Amino acid sequence: MKSALHRPDWTPQVDIGMRILITGATGGLGRALVGMLLEGSDCIIGAHGASQSIDAGDERIIPLNRTFESEQDCRGLVDEFAEKAGGIDALVVLSGSIRATGHWKDMSAAGWEGEIDTNLNQPFFLARAAMAHMHGQGAGGRIVLNGTESALHGGSAFSFPYAIAKRGTECMVQGLAREGAPDNILVNGVRFGYIASGFHQRWHEKTEEDMAARADMVPLKRGGDPEEAAALMIYLLSGWASFITGQMLPLTGGDWL
């Protein structure tokens, strides 16, 4: 029997007035997260996109556009949101990409370094900047980073640097969580399996047939819905996750079992 999403009749919520910066908010996962927050929570959302923007005509959204070329760009985005929102209570990093499409044996040094920069260096710079604000505010905070289940299995020949960056993210989650714990800054991550968010089609030009074949490899015989990912991330931002830090939570449909 094929698994299906059973959408409950309740929506997860965060604290009233929580100020949440979401990088990569214009992607499939980001749009689902923004939408679910708007549906269930009275919060302030910094919706970041590199070349696009989210403007739902809702006063709770602060649209932010910035490309990340350096540490200063990452810090600048966090500073901009904190200034406009009056502070920052949470950071969710969903920005990332797989731009290199060939086998790692043929990858240029620039291609390799670009993948590591986008998927490991930039999340670190963003998290470090957010933690500095949170330390200064003295009211705790939440940071959620994104990972991939394939990082635990060596990645593929065509996404090797991405997988390595995400394995580094797991170390980052633990180290930042240890650093943030004395000030109640909780740092966690989600280890995604195949989520039907459009990521693979966008970055690897996968077809619907490719995606159907990928879903068939999952024990539950489908890709995860972006709303399932959004609900898990909102849980990590909520008061119910106040005793969770330094963890990577898998959302995989049983992939790799």
Image (cartoon, helix red, strand yellow):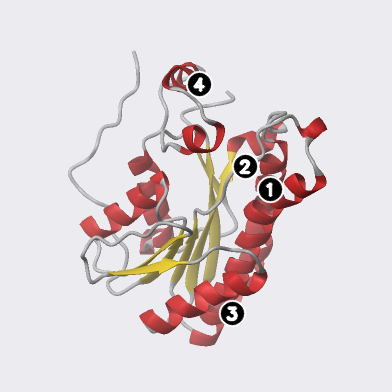
The residue furthest left is: 9
Identify the secondary structure beneath mark 2: loop
Q: Where residue 21 appears, x then y in whole percent? A: 43, 67
Residue identifier under label 2: 99
- Residue at (59% x, 36% y) in the render: 149
Whichever of labels 2 and 1 marks the residue nearer the N terminus, that label is 2
| Sequence-wise first label, 4 or 1 | 1
Tag on residue 132?
A: 3
Whether residue 181 is visible, yes or no, is no
Nearer to us of marks 4 and 1 is 1
Q: The C terminus appears in which quarter of the rendering?
A: top right
Given contact means CB atoms under 8 Å apart, are the residues at marks 2 and 1 in contact?
yes
Query: Cα distance, mark 3 to mark 2?
Result: 30 Å
The residues bearing labels 4 and 1 have C-alpha atoms spaced at a distance of 23 Å
* Residue 232 coordinates in the image, percent (x, y): 40, 48
Tell whether 209 sits left or right of 168.
Answer: left
Q: Answer whether labels 4 and 2 touch (C-beta < 8 Å).
A: no
Residue type of the residue flagged with mark 3:
Ala
Q: Residues within 10 Å of mark 3 (few under 14, many from 20)?
A: few
Q: Which mark is residue 214?
A: 4
Residue at x 56% of width, y 78% of height = 183
Circle 1 Cα neighbour tier, 10 Å, few/some/many (<14 / 14–19 / ≥20): many
Q: Nearer the viewer, mark 4 or mark 3?
A: 4
CB contact under 8 Å: marks 3 and 1: no
Is 135 placed above or below 25 here? Answer: below
Residue farthest top in this picture: 1
Tell me the element at label 3.
Answer: helix
Tag in front: 3 or 1: 1
The residue under label 1 is: 115
Q: Nearer the viewer, residue 202 or 78?
A: 202
Q: Secondary structure at mark 1?
A: helix
